[in-house]
Image (cartoon, rainbow, N blue to C red):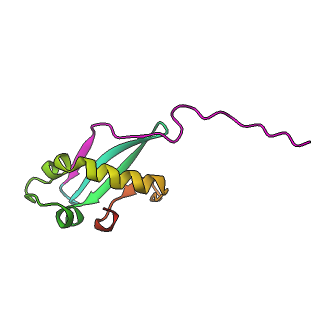
């Protein structure tokens, strides 16, 4: 007889949420939003070139676009997280093709 012991899933396991954390790096021109995945922080980065291809906004104020189009950015990030498309450092890169 085979015995299978399974650990019940914790309520946090597999859960993805997006706290209201975002930042802009003017040197690299990359916007970052944070995701919380199974209790761990995941940085989700999108370059301004891809942001400006997808959304209409003033390049002088890129974070206004991130705020305005946050739902679409989160949906793209969630898809990449679900597909486990992580970088070596554990972050997610969102490009135009991901929308």
Q: Is residue 39 magenta?
A: no
Give above or below for 88 relative to 33: below
- Identify the residue shown where x is 45% and y is 54%: 89
Answer with the quarter of the image where residue 3 lies.
Answer: top right
In the image shown, does 88 or 72 lie closer to the viewer?
72
75 lies left or right of 90? left
- Residue appearing at x 19%, y 67% in the figure: 53
Q: In percent of the image, x 44 and y 52: which residue is there?
A: 81
Q: Residue furthest front?
A: 1
Is 17 left or right of 29, judged from the image as shown? right
Corner quadrant of residue 92: bottom left
Viewport quadrant of the N terminus: top right
Q: Taking 37 as reference, is 28 above or below it?
A: below
Q: Nearer the viewer, residue 73 or 43?
A: 73
Query: Overall secondary structure of the magenta stretch?
Result: loop
Quarter that holds the C terminus: bottom left
Which x, y percent locates residue 41?
A: 41, 41
Q: Is residue 11 magenta?
A: yes
Q: Is residue 31 left or right of residue 44?
A: left
Residue 63 percent coordinates (x, y)? 16, 49
Q: Position of residue 22 (x, y in %)?
A: 25, 44
Q: 85 and 56: which one is in front?
A: 56
How far across and how far down the image is residue 75, in percent? 33, 51
Query: Magenta part of the protein: which range?
Result: 1-25
* Image position of 64 with respect to 3: above or below: below
**Residue pictured at 32% horizontal, 37% vertical:** 19
């Amino acid at each position: 007889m085979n015995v299978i012991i399974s650990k019940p899933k914790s309520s946090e396991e597999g859960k993805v949420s997006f706290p209201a954390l975002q930042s802009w790096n003017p040197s690299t021109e990359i916007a970052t939003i944070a995701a919380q995945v199974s209790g761990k922080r995941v940085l989700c980065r999108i370059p301004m070139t891809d942001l400006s291809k997808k959304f209409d906004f003033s390049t002088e104020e890129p974070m206004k676009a991130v705020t305005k189009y946050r739902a679409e950015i989160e949906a793209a990030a969630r898809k990449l997280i679900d597909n486990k498309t992580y970088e070596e450092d554990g972050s997610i890169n969102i490009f135009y093709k991901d929308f």
